Amino acid sequence: MRPISTLIRWLGSLHFALFLIAATALFAITGTILEAKTSSHRYAAIFTYSNPLFMALLGGYFINILLSALSRYPYKKKHIPFLITHLGMLILLAGAFIKGKYGLQGNLRLLEGGTARTVMLPETYAVQVFTPGQREEIALLRQLRLQGVSQSVQLDLVGYAPHSHIQYESWVKQGQVFINGLKPFPILPETATLSPSTRIRIKDEVWNAYAFQTEHPDTLRDSLEKSGTRPALLFAETEAATFVTVFPSKGETSTQVYTKERPQKLAVYDQGYGGYCAFFQGDDFTLETPVQCRCRPQTAHPKIEELRPQLTVRTKSDKGTQFITLPFEPHGDGLKWPILGGSALLRFQPALQTLPYSVRLKQARQITYPHSGQPFSYEADVVFTSLKTGEQITKTLSMNHVHETWEGYRFYLANMTPLDAGAVKEVYIVVNHDPAKYLLTYPGALLMSLGILLLFWWNPYKT
Amino acid sequence: MTLISISGRESTDIYQVQAPSEWRVIPGEKGSDTKKPLAEFQIEPQIRVTVHNFPGQSIPPQAQIARWQGQFAQLEPQDVKIEPVAWSGYAGFTFEATGTVQGKPTTVLAWTLQLDPRHGRVLQDPDKSADVTIKAVGPPSAIAANRSLLNRFAHSFELKSEIPCDP
């Protein structure tokens, strides 16, 4: 019994409290240094505030405060301020624990005129499975395990890379040019003599199709123009883009550039279930090619915020089995990739959480000082509709004007782009929900303040 | 202010707008003739406000403005004001011009609006994703006296149904 009572006494002692404070200070110093060295808040957080040891410290504080308060038993009148202060601290810690476990901190991205009901949870990874009218979420846990079940498709994790280089391939894939409806033809290294890779029939004409790997697409185009070969198609593949030039038998030569960034213009078939195509619109014909995403694993760097992980999954359903590698879409706005003959769409992105509200953005604006372009404030007119009661509230959010609902959800205006008056704006709203705020956190802080006030005002230990 | 629903060319009640209750509402006719307004409002005896949409036709806002300018018999450049605007997913221009129409001094206060293409991709109904114009025509003094009401009216114009924006 003696060692146990010694341990209990030590856990409630000033020595243990000092140890906890020193350990917390060490964590804070480490966090500051790591953040300064890596410019990454998330990297620092993994080793500090999100570290299980730091969580254990919070538990240590709880035990220390509780045992220190209990150790004064039997209580006297002079202990009242001390007990109130310690009770306040315990309630505060319990509030912090509940917020960490059950609270919400997410981002809502809204386009003027649009309505959203789901927030994106930062620092989370999930595969969203879309089927017509339905979305299912399979979470990717830190231990690299998929958690969750989809009714439409079975997913098994077969590969993961913490960082990857992502390119979108259109006309040229694996050294060949692909045009829908035609046999692929090879892309050749640039040579002095221009010879066609193949001949293709478009409408009633036979076109020479040239395809070269080059770093000088303009020179190639000029050479072909000078040669007078018409009608002809030229595919000039560079490191960063594919230049497609059409030399019709009548009419002007025209070029379109297809970069390997995420395409801005695509032909979308059956809302994505039928796939995506890049296209060239000629005067009286259209050429199309399927768009694919190519992910190549790269060495991860400490700035976690800029990492683009990739995930390879085996998808299985009654339609068969298919392997697919998905790039991480940190804003959840990338393409949804079709699988198993278009039976579902997949996207690797942060996890989503549905709010008990629908949030509709009417208008967002930048307000400038009179006769100046200097921004004075940013405002967003938002309509909140409770999904439980149907009640509607219109609020104007601004930098220091937060909307808080009765259920304790707080909406902060975080960002707005673009800022021109004549552009439809996209607004980022941070959504925060602390289920313990009114029950524990605020009462705890009040009690603690009251206890401290009483300690100074009453001065109960004065002899 | 009263919330008024406006039908499209084919679909019923696709838009909504807040109009002062004293404005007289003249309901428009459904149909594909885009020359006919979707809704018409009479303010006092002299001001007429019309709302049009143009499903399936993409008319650049500049072309609308040029058309409105062409409706004046006489118009001085200094009496024309064009400003970019955006709200409720629409972007375009406010056009305000004072000149002579059929021998009478007239002010046109109008908005030419296009729905953002990102919304257009979500909406399947061409009626809903159509370009819109809102146009108030009347004597300069009457338009000046009602400018703030007309502005509030135009800025309250929006699609009735929600445009999903979830990731």
Image (cartoon, coloured by chain):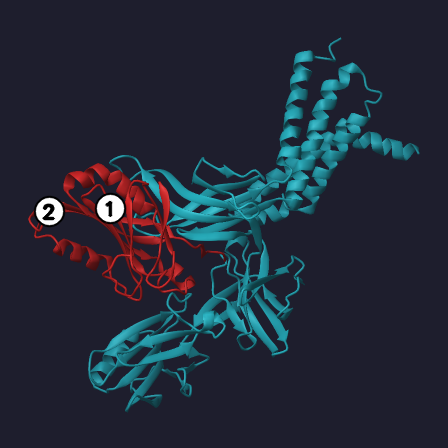
Chain colours: A cyan, B red
Q: Quadrant of the C terminus of chain A?
A: top right
Instruction: Name the outermost residue toward the right.
Output: A1
Graded by Cα atoms within 10 Å as few (under 14), some (14 to 19) or many (20 or more), the crowding at tag 2 reads: many
Q: Secondary structure at mark 1?
A: strand
Instruction: Give the amino acid at mark 2.
Output: Gly
What numbered label is drawn on residue A405? none
Q: Quadrant of the N terminus of chain A?
A: top right
* Numbered label tally: 2
Residue A64 at what x, y percent from top left? Answer: 76, 32
Residue A337 at what x, y percent from top left? Answer: 51, 70
Residue nearer the viewer, A207 or A203: A203
Residue A26 at what x, y percent from top left? Answer: 64, 38
Graded by Cα atoms within 10 Å as few (under 14), some (14 to 19) or many (20 or more), the crowding at tag 1 reads: some
Q: Which residue is mark 2?
A: B99
- What residue is at 17 percent from the left and 45 percent from the top? B138
Residue A284 at what x, y percent from top left? Answer: 27, 81
**Marked residue nearer the N-terminal end (1 or 2):** 1
